Image (cartoon, rainbow, N blue to C red):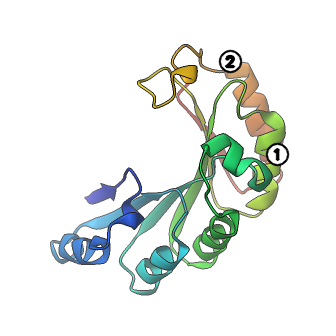
Amino acid sequence: MGVAITGGEPTMQPDLPDFIRRVKSMGYLVKLDTNGSNPDVIEKLIHERLVDYIAMDVKAPLKRYQEVTKSDIETNKIKQSISLIMRSGIDYEFRTTVVPGLVGKDDVVAIVKLIKGAKRYYLQRYFKAETLDDAYSNLKPPKRKDVQEMCEAAKPYVKECGIRGI
C-alpha cells in the first residue's frame, strides 16, 4: 500500500520531508506528484530515499512554459528536475495534459525530445472541470484519435507512452 502526495504543489511545503518520514515509518510507499518547480526539494527527497515513485507534469515545451502555465516559472528548474528524476534510479513517469488550442502535437513532440529516453510518458486528455481560468471552462476534450496520434509521435523518444482519460 502507498500514499500519493499531490497538490497544489507539495514541494512548496517546508515540512514535506518530515511528513514523508512519518508516512514511511508506518510502512507505506510514497508517490510524489510534482510540477518540477523545486528541484532542490526533489533532489533531497531522492537522496534521502523518501520517495518510491515520482510523477512529474511537464506542461509544455520549455520555450512555451510561461505562456502555457501563465506563471513566471523558471524553465531551468523544470529541466533540472527532469534530469534528477531520470537519473534517480527510482520509478517515475512524466505526463502532459492535452488541452485543445493550448497543447498540441508539436508541443508533445518537443516535450518528448526534452525527456528523451524516459521510462514512461502519459498523455492525459483534458476534461471539463472547475478551472481557475474561465477561458477553459467551455473547452471540449481533445479527440481520442488526435491524442492517439500524439502518443504514436512520442513513442520513438520514450520507452513507454500511454493515454489516460480515454
> 69 or 2, which lies in front?
69
Residue drawn 51% across the image and 18% down it: 137
Image: 58 above or below 127: below
Residue 32, quarter of picture: bottom left
In which quadrant will I find the N terminus?
Answer: bottom left
- Please tell me which of labels 2 and 1 falls first in the chain: 1
> 17 or 123, which lies in front?
17
Image: 20 above or below 37: below
Tell me if 132 is positioned left or right of 112 in this view: left
Tell me if 51 is positioned left or right of 111 in this view: left
| Residue that sits furthest to the bottom in the current view | 47
Q: Which residue is mark 2?
A: 143
Q: Which residue is mark 1?
A: 109
Q: Where is residue 57 shown, x and y percent of the image? A: 56, 51
| Marker disc for residue 101 | none
Q: Where is residue 66 shown, x and y percent of the image? A: 68, 49
Residue drawn 40% across the image and 70% down it: 52
Q: Amino acid at mark 2?
A: Lys
Q: Amino acid at mark 1?
A: Val
Q: Where is residue 37 shown, x and y percent of the image? A: 54, 63
Label 1 environment density (alpha carbons within 10 Å; few <14, some 14–19, many ≥20): some
